[in-house]
Image (tube, rainbow, N blue to C red):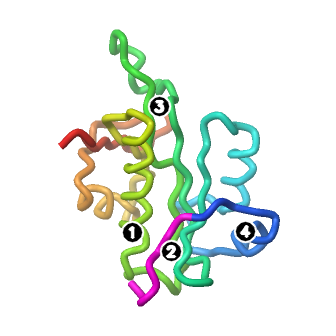
Amino acid sequence: MTAASPRLEEVTPDTVLEACRLEVAPEQRKFVSPVAQSLAEASVHPDVAWPRLICDGDRIVGFVMAFFGVPFDYDAGVPDAPPRSGLWRLAVAAGEQGRGYGRFAVGAVNEEIRRRGGMVSTVTWHPGEGGPEGFYLGLGYRKRGLTADGEYLGDLDLTG
C-alpha cells in the first residue's frame, strides 16, 4: 500500500461520477459488475446495501459494497438459518491492484459485520479462470457450494 492509510468513505454527490468511472482490469470485467450498477442496486435496497469507496489519500482506488441481514436461497433447507451478511461487490481499480486494497476492504466489511453483531461473513463469486476464488480462499473463506445462480458461496467465521 502507499504511505497514506486506506479508508472507506461514503459515496457522495461529489464522488459518485468518479466512482462510476472506476474500472477493473479487462480480464476481470466478467467477474465484477460496474460500480454504477452496484450503486443503482444500493439505491433500491437501502436497508441492506452498504456501498463505500476505498480511498487512499485523495485517490479513489476501489469500491466495496456489503449487505446485511439477507435470507439466502442457499439456506432454504436449513431450519432456523439466520440471515446472512457479507461482501456483495468488490472492485479495485486496474492500476491499483496488488497493493492490499482488496484485503483491506474485506477486512473493513468484516469489522462492520462484527460491529452489527454478526458472526459469519458471506461472499459469492462466479467460477472461472482468473476469477476471485483464490483471493477469497486466501483470506480464509471456505467454499460451501453453488447458489441457485451458479455462483460459489463461501463463508468466514468471524468469532475467532
Q: Is residue 4 magenta?
A: yes
Determine the residue located farthest toward the bottom in the rendered image: 3
> Which residue bears the numbered disc 1?
130
> Which residue bears the numbered disc 2?
27
Q: Earlier in the sequence, mark 3 or mark 4?
A: 4
Q: Are marks 2 and 4 in contact (CB under 8 Å)?
A: no
**How far is mark 1 from mark 2, CA to CA?**
7 Å
Q: Look at the numbered disc 4 and give the secondary structure of its residue.
A: helix
Q: Nearer the viewer, mark 3 or mark 4?
A: 4
> Which residue bears the numbered disc 4?
20
> Which residue bears the numbered disc 3?
148
Q: Amino acid at mark 3?
A: Ala
Main secondary structure of the magenta stretch: loop
Q: Are marks 1 and 2 in contact (CB under 8 Å)?
A: yes
Q: Earlier in the sequence, mark 2 or mark 4?
A: 4
Q: Look at the numbered disc 2 and give the secondary structure of its residue.
A: helix
**How far is mark 1 from mark 3, CA to CA?**
22 Å
Q: Amino acid at mark 4?
A: Cys
Residue 100 is tagged as: none
Q: Nearer the viewer, mark 1 or mark 4?
A: 4
Q: Look at the numbered disc 1 and give the secondary structure of its residue.
A: loop
Q: Earlier in the sequence, mark 1 or mark 4?
A: 4
Q: Earlier in the sequence, mark 1 or mark 3?
A: 1
Q: Amino acid at mark 1?
A: Gly
Read off the magenta span.
Answer: 1-8
Crowd tier of the residue under label 1, counting other residues whose Cα lies within 10 Å: few below 14, some 14–19, many 20 or above:
few
Which quarter shows the N terminus? Answer: bottom left
Q: Amino acid at mark 2?
A: Glu
Residue at image location 45% in from the left, 25% down from the top: 83
Q: Earlier in the sequence, mark 1 or mark 2?
A: 2
**How far is mark 3 from mark 4, CA to CA?**
29 Å
